[in-house]
Image (spheres, coloured by chain):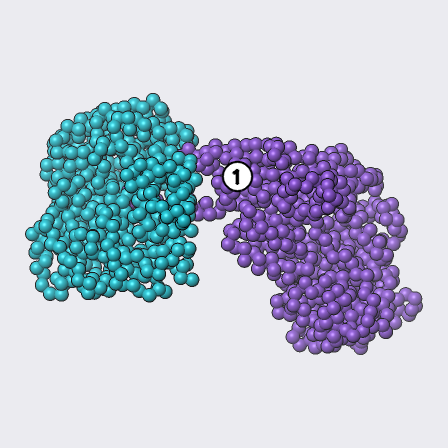
Chain colours: A cyan, B purple
């Protein structure tokens, strides 16, 4: 009976945990980067302050959450062991033993979910909606050329500021925010002074950004000139741009309803590439657009490479429900490329960009060494992040939450949020479904070239689970869709892998440390392969 | 035959749920003896003995069945007779009153034979004085006309001395008319021809009379002309029954012997047996024994179907009724068994053969973990109907399941996979041993022992149809490996043909095909015949080289090629592309006779996955995972459930 229950959700009651932590005398490191802001807050007198002292410290090495054992098992609160000191600790507040064949009666201790060091900010304004887009956006129309005084934008920003300041700031010792990402929408449409006010709010809430913080902004060709770009960099502090080129062909840009043409693309590239304050920029393309030919794709890749961005994102067109494309086209049918054509386009991109010195570090992302998008890495490593603004998602304390996608509802949400904070907090019990966590971990990490860290996975879900996962993927290691690697990222031969899975008598050290999808075959089949693993993680 | 098969399948699904319901209709009982006043009793307060069966010595009893081709009006005629005798109220209740099963009501056909007891006052002509009316007890059994349920007819006839052979005045004699006539004729029963539906504009009673004469050698002058719809001619039916059909031959003063005709399970009352008392009498409280099992039971309740269960406390010689005796399952109630007074010794009655199921299909839960639920359902089914045969088996592809004869419980229809129907083949090996094979997968292609001969069951089919269709019918029968036995005209327009056909050839789709090539005019009947030697091979279906046991079939060598092609093509349509190329092969032993390939998936990837869509993407992939769950995995290939059921449809070899 107990075995079947091991996948239940557990609630983490903060009250309990605080007491436990107090009893266990946690070390309390002072934050060297702590701003004056933080210091001030530390001075708040009374119980609140002492409570705050109990809050999360910066380092994760010694602050462990007491574990939450299975309902039927004795609670083993005092068994602590250090977690692997890795920066990749996921938000996981539950302990789970999945397999029925291996049961440990002592569940593993859980790390306290770290506080987010990443913030996503949604700026939803666009000139008009692109035909493939199903994002929460606000189309402003092209009539008013002077957007800088558009009340729709300033009103929205007001709500955004309120949302940020109403956010529960868990500690005066909040770790500095390392990445901020302005996504949209078309953030470049928002006047720089307003963007700046948003960033100010972030600072006010969480303290000064980390010294080397990455501040990214999505920008569209035709929405900015040199002055505006300079302002975004100089006044706001943007240091990374994600440029929404999407295509280099006039007819394709038109067919997908982009508000810009080829001329604006070239102009924008020149501006961004020549901008000093921008340390890294990404050129974003969509592959498999309707009417795309091999020649066009070849051209796009060539032009992308010659623009010399540090980063290239290539999104395969997804025909989403409710979009204009969904009305017009059926995937795999003309004028959309066939499945094998679009697989070919994917391979072309992988090949050409690799040749040009880009690493294919995630299914749809390429970069020059060291230029990974830090913010996106947060997602793929299943680390926590804040989300602010219309339709944005956050992942805090193991809980994913999406804000309303409609403007009116979002505004209501912010109003409520403000009231709630003043009326004391109420939602400190995080319910985390362990199955979902496991699936997220596998789904996200398998998107990356780093792959799934098996030790790390095992530390949460146990050896039996790890082995079942390996068994399920075994045929695809043979077929070359999945690659097994050792600690040094050297490929492990299938036969060795086999031997290790057999385990038992041999008592060999488990050499396989990582499993990743191969490039491009495995990446191309990622859905299928991940769905297979889900069959093991959530039978 | 596919349609028939389907009908059969649906037929047993909800066996007799209605008998257990207490009906709103208050049965009207004739008060026997004394005045012919009506007196109504509700079920609850109808006391035993309200009907005094002692008034009916065998000479006042007539037991008869109504038999006919499907839809010729048996049940409607039964309605009229029940009304005429006041057994049911005119205009109350539904038409075809005795068709109580859900499937019967839905499809408008009779599936189970039903018995009803009626009382009728009639003066036998020899008495001369017409006032001198006597009360008669008449047992009517309405039978199904559908070829799949002819077993019901034969067991009904065991309780009768005569039949009404109903023939549609417009359609004339049809295949089941012939088949049922012979059943009655061979049982030495009195046959009263009834030409029904004479109200129809196309009615041609003269032609029907001629057919009766030429086919059955019955005197056309004896035929009654009726319309069960308008009531025309009905007044002659019961007098003819009393005048022409002999009374039951049993001996009143001999020890009790009764024939167990049928049994079913009622949730509240337990097992209810239908019996015909051949000799002696049966009373409530009696201890009765079964000659088949030697078990002894106490009679807890006994009575007649009038038409609902009506307790009488007693049944006398020649009477037909029900007995409740604390049997736990219908398995204890073997139809054809002789029941007698415990402690007495009697010679068992000849009885009749139990139903023999010659068509088998595997039945597996779609979701392997549902085996218990299916097991339970099957148990209930077999508990309800002694005529279903089931055995457990395991398929490597489908997990644990059953091999069942004839029928599938309807409520599980959606959740089970049933495999291609098969018939029991016989294989003879070099060492002289013979093995009967019901599940093709059980016959290994390479058993070490050499197969020296194969045998398959055959049937004798009777087909009656308008003569212009002779060509297509002959073509169909020879395609189905039929051997012509007889060819005659039953009148100037209609032909009767007899064929010996392998049973295998008629279990899937034969009847449908026959109907379609004859514009629906052909009628068809068959009886089991002996095993015939045949050139059979086992046809394996392989996916990436691995045989799928649930898809194996045994086919005639000459047809293997075509069947193999069909199966392989069909499968190709139902298996989705997967990560690897899939080859589908049909093979006899190691010889591949058909092959298809499914090209691998090229791409199945979600372009972006950022913070906002983690949950959505996870759900998408979870859905994809759920899709996989509904697949059966053979080797590295996922096969959707539909593929199995679709193969069932294709295999008309
Ligand atoms: N016109 C006309 N229709 C009739 C007559 N008798 C029956 N029918 C119709 O014929 C159809 C079949 O009648 P049933 O009484 O169900 O026939 P059945 O012989 O019991 O059929 P099965 O039990 O399925 O073999 C029904 O639609 C009846 O209404 C009749 O005398 N005249
Ligand atoms: Mg009927």
Where residue A329 appears, as percent x and y from the top left, is 40, 33
Q: Which residue is mark 1?
A: B574
Where residue B160 appears, as percent x and y from the top left, is 81, 61
Q: Is residue B536 above or below residue B143?
A: above
Q: Is residue B438 above or below residue B129?
A: above
Q: Is residue A133 visible?
A: no
Q: Residue at x 34, y 45 (%)?
A: A510
Where residue B45 appears, as percent x and y from the top left, is 66, 77
* Number of numbered labels in the structure image: 1
In the foreground, B446 or A410: B446
In the foreground, B609 or B146: B609
**Is label 1's Cβ within 8 Å of ligand 1?**
no
Q: Is residue A67 above or below residue A377?
A: below
Numbered disc 1: what chain? B
Locate residue B250 relative to residue A337 in the image: left or right.
right
Where residue B218 appears, as percent x and y from the top left, is 88, 51
In the foreground, B147 or A285: A285
Q: Is residue A99 above or below residue A361?
A: below
Q: Is residue B291 visible?
A: yes
Q: Residue at x 22, y 45 (%)?
A: A120
Locate residue B507 relative to residue A133 in the image: left or right.
right
Q: Residue at x 12, y 62 (%)?
A: A49
Res. B303 image quadrant:
bottom right
Which element type, helix, strand or loop, lies under badge 1?
helix
Q: In which quadrant will I find the N terminus of chain A?
A: bottom left
Locate residue B22 relative to residue A372 in the image: left or right.
right
Res. A187 image quadrant:
top left
Mark 1 neighbour class, 10 Å CA radius: few under 14, some 14 to 19, many 20 or more: some
Q: Residue at x 19, y 65 (%)?
A: A23
């Amino acid at each position: 009976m107990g075995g079947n229950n091991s996948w239940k959700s557990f609630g983490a009651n903060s009250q309990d945990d605080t007491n436990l932590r107090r009893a266990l005398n946690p070390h309390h490191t002072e934050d060297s980067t702590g701003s004056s802001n933080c210091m001030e807050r530390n001075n708040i007198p009374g119980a609140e302050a002492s409570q705050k002292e109990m809050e999360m410290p910066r380092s994760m090495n010694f602050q462990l959450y007491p574990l939450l054992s299975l309902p039927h098992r004795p609670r083993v609160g005092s068994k602590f062991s250090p977690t692997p000191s890795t920066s990749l600790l996921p938000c996981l507040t539950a302990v789970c033993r999945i397999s029925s064949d291996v049961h440990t009666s002592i569940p593993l201790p859980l790390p306290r979910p770290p506080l987010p060091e990443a913030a996503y900010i949604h700026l939803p304004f666009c000139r008009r909606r692109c035909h493939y887009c199903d994002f929460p956006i606000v189309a402003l129309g092209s009539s008013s050329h002077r957007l800088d005084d558009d009340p729709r934008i300033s009103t929205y920003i007001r709500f955004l500021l309120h949302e940020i300041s109403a956010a529960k700031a868990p500690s005066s010792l909040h770790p500095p925010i390392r990445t901020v990402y302005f996504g949209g929408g078309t953030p470049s449409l928002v006047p720089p002074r307003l963007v700046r006010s948003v960033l100010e709010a972030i600072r006010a809430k969480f303290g000064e950004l980390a010294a080397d913080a990455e501040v990214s902004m999505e920008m569209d060709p035709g929405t900015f000139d040199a002055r505006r770009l300079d302002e975004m960099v100089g006044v706001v502090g943007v240091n990374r741009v994600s440029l929404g080129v999407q295509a280099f062909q006039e007819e394709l840009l038109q067919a997908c309803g982009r508000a810009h043409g080829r001329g604006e693309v070239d102009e924008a590239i020149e501006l961004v590439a020549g901008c000093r304050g921008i340390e890294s920029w990404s050129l974003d393309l969509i592959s498999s657009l309707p009417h795309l030919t091999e020649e066009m794709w070849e051209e796009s890749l060539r032009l992308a490479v010659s623009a010399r961005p540090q980063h290239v994102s290539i999104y395969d067109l997804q025909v989403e429900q409710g979009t204009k494309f969904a009305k017009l086209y059926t995937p795999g049918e003309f004028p959309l490329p066939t499945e094998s054509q679009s697989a070919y386009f994917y391979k072309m991109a992988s090949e050409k960009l690799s040749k040009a010195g880009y690493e294919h570090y995630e299914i749809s992302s390429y970069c020059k060494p060291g230029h990974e998008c830090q913010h996106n890495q947060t997602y793929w490593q299943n680390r926590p992040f804040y989300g602010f603004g219309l339709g944005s998602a956050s992942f805090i304390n193991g809980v994913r939450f999406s804000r309303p996608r409609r403007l009116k509802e979002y505004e209501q949400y912010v109003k409520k949020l403000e009231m709630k904070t003043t009326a004391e907090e109420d939602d400190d019990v995080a319910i985390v479904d362990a199955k979902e966590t496991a699936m997220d971990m596998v789904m996200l990490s398998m998107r990356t070239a780093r792959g799934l860290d098996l030790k790390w996975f095992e530390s949460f879900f146990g050896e039996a689970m790890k082995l079942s996962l390996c068994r399920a993927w075994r045929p695809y290691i043979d077929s070359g869709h999945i690659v097994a690697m050792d600690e040094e990222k050297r490929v492990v031969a299938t036969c060795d892998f086999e031997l290790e899975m057999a385990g038992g008598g041999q008592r060999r050290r488990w050499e396989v440390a990582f499993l990743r999808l191969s490039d491009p075959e495995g990446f191309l089949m990622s859905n299928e392969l991940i769905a297979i693993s889900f069959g093991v993680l959530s039978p | 035959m596919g349609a028939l098969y389907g009908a059969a399948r649906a037929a047993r699904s909800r066996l007799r749920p209605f008998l257990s319901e207490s009906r709103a209709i208050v049965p009207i009982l004739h008060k026997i003896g004394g005045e012919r006043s009506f007196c109504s009793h509700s079920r609850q307060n109808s006391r035993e003995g309200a009907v005094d069966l002692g008034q009916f010595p065998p000479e006042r009893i007539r037991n008869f069945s109504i038999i006919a081709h499907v839809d010729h009006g048996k049940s409607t005629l039964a309605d009229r007779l029940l009304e005429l005798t006041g057994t049911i109220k005119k205009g109350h209740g539904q038409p075809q009153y005795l068709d109580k099963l859900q499937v019967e009501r839905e499809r408008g056909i009779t599936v189970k034979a039903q018995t009803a007891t009626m009382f009728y006052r009639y003066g036998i002509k020899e008495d001369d004085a017409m006032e001198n009316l006597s009360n008669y007890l008449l047992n009517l059994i309405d039978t199904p006309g559908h070829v799949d349920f002819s077993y019901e007819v034969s067991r009904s006839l065991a309780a009768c001395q005569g039949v009404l052979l109903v023939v549609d005045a417009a359609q004339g004699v049809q295949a089941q008319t012939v088949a049922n006539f012979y059943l009655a004729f061979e049982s030495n029963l009195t046959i009263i021809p009834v030409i029904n539906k004479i109200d129809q504009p196309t009615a041609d009673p003269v032609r029907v009379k001629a057919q009766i004469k030429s086919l059955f050698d019955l005197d056309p002058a004896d035929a009654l002309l009726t319309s069960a719809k308008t009531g025309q001619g009905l007044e002659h039916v019961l007098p003819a029954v009393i005048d022409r059909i002999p009374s039951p031959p049993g001996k009143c003063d001999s020890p009790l012997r009764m024939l167990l005709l049928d049994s079913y399970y009622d949730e509240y009352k337990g097992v209810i047996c239908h019996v015909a008392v051949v000799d002696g009498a049966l009373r409530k409280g009696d201890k009765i024994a079964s000659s088949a099992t030697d078990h002894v039971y106490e009679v807890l309740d006994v009575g007649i179907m009038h038409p609902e269960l009506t307790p009488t406390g007693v049944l006398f010689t020649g009477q037909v009724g029900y007995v409740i005796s604390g049997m736990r399952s219908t398995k204890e109630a073997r139809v054809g068994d002789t029941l007698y007074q415990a402690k007495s010794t009697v010679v068992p009655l000849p009885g009749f053969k139990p139903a023999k199921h010659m068509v088998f299909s595997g039945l597996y839960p779609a979701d392997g973990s549902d085996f218990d639920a299916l097991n339970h359902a099957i148990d209930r089914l077999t508990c309800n109907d002694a005529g279903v045969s089931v055995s457990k088996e395991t398929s490597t592809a489908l997990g644990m399941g059953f091999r069942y004869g004839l029928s599938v419980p309807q409520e599980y229809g959606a959740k089970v996979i049933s495999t291609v129907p098969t018939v029991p083949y016989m294989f003879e090996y070099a060492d002289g041993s013979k093995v009967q094979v019901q599940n093709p997968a059980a016959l290994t292609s390479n058993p070490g022992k050499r197969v020296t001969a194969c045998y398959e069951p055959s049937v004798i089919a009777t087909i009656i149809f308008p003569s212009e269709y002779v060509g297509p019918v002959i073509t169909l029968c020879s395609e189905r490996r039929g051997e012509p036995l007889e060819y005659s005209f039953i009148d100037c327009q209609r032909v009767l043909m007899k064929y010996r056909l392998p049973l295998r050839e008629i279990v899937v789709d034969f009847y449908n095909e026959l109907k379609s090539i004859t514009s629906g005019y052909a009628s068809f009947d068959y009886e089991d015949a002996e095993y015939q030697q045949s050139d059979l091979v086992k046809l394996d279906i392989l996916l990436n080289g691995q045989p799928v046991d649930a898809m194996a079939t045994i086919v005639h060598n000459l047809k293997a090629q075509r069947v193999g092609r069909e199966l392989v093509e069909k499968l190709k349509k139902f298996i989705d592309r997967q990560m690897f190329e899939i080859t589908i092969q049909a093979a006899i032993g190691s010889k591949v006779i058909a092959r298809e390939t499914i090209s691998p998936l090229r791409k199945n990837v979600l372009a972006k996955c950022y913070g906002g869509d983690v949950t959505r993407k996870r759900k998408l992939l979870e859905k994809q995972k759920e899709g996989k769950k509904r697949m059966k995995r053979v080797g590295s290939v996922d096969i959707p459930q539909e593929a199995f059921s679709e193969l069932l449809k294709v295999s008309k070899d």
